Image (cartoon, grey):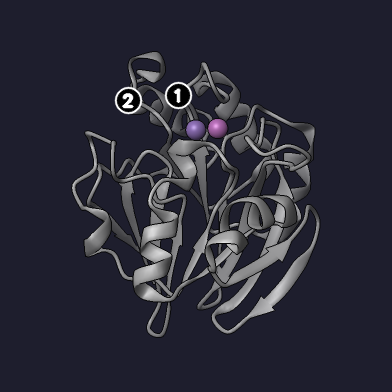
Amino acid sequence: MKIEFLGHACFLLESSDSKILIDPFLTGNELATKTADQIEADYIFVTHGHDDHVGDTINIAKRTGATVGAVVEVAKHLFTPVGIKTLVGNIGGKQETPYGSVKFVPASHGSGVPGALACGFVLEISGKKIYHAGDTGLVAEMQFLADEGIDVALLPIGDFYTMGPEDAVKAVEMIKPKRVIPMHYNTFPAIQQDPHAFKQAVEAQNLCEVTILNPGETLEI
Ligand code: NI
Ligand code: MN
């Protein structure tokens, strides 16, 4: 499968038969190399209701017919009223999907929607497990992800709104993924970070491999 970084916290996971998009913030992201109308998706997963994560979800879902996955309150507040097909879940819940499965996992962050929790996702696609942390601080619950056998963890390192590089290294220690791709940095002045320093810190402890992707770059696993 292919993991394409589209900038900020947006990734497109592509297997032979499905395209899974996460947190598609393209319009308004000066670092994005693709526009919303260039993206095809079968599913769009949205970790929480902040603008830099909902982004172009509604437009892409309307054009492609994609199903939007989110916690119940986020789906009911943002997506159901505009006639978009949704897949709803909540923290701790796993469900089978045509491409594999999705599990909603804890994140510690505001959701932007009253009564809703922010979340992360563990997605199983083509026998690989991808963890998208969403926006989150370092939380003890991340240690439980070690049992999932995560192939690739997508972790925020920007600081300010989420965990920064030092806490993200601690997250890697708990999650024990095979590989990490850093995200949610350099998009705005407040979240400027050097991903190479993060990579060195993780690899100095032999925790796992770190792959730094620039917007538009793809990793094949
Ligand atoms: Ni946020
Ligand atoms: Mn964010």
* 64 left or right, relative to 140: left
Q: Position of residue 24 (x, y in %)?
A: 40, 51
Q: Quadrant of the N terminus?
A: bottom left
* 160 left or right, relative to 190: right
Q: Position of residue 137 (x, y in %)?
A: 65, 27
| Residue of label 1 | 158
Q: Position of residue 164 (x, y in %)?
A: 52, 21
User: Mark 1 and 2 residues: CB-CB less than 8 Å, in contact?
Assistant: yes
Residue at the image point whose x is 62% and y is 32% from the top: 136
Image quarter of residue 97? bottom right
Q: Nearer the viewer, residue 82 or 152?
A: 82
Residue at the image point whose x is 55% and y is 76% from the top: 127
Q: Is residue 99 above or below residue 28?
A: below
* 154 left or right, relative to 60: right
Task: Give amino acid for label 2.
Answer: Asn
Image quarter of residue 55? top left
* 67 left or right, relative to 41: right
Q: Position of residue 199 (x, y in %)?
A: 40, 31
Residue with the most extreme left position: 33
Q: Quadrant of the C terminus?
A: bottom left
Mark 1–mark 2 distance (CA, rounded to whole Å)? 7 Å
Task: Give amino acid for label 1.
Answer: Gly
Tag shown at residue 186: 2
Q: Is residue 82 above or below residue 114?
A: below
Crowding around mark 1 (Cα neighbors within 10 Å: few <14, some 14 to 19, many 20+) is many
- Ligand 2 neighbours mark 2 (CB distance < 8 Å): no
Precedes in sequence: disc 1 or disc 2 = 1
Image quarter of residue 25? top left
Q: Is residue 221 visible?
A: no
Does dot 2 land on a helix, a strand or a loop? loop
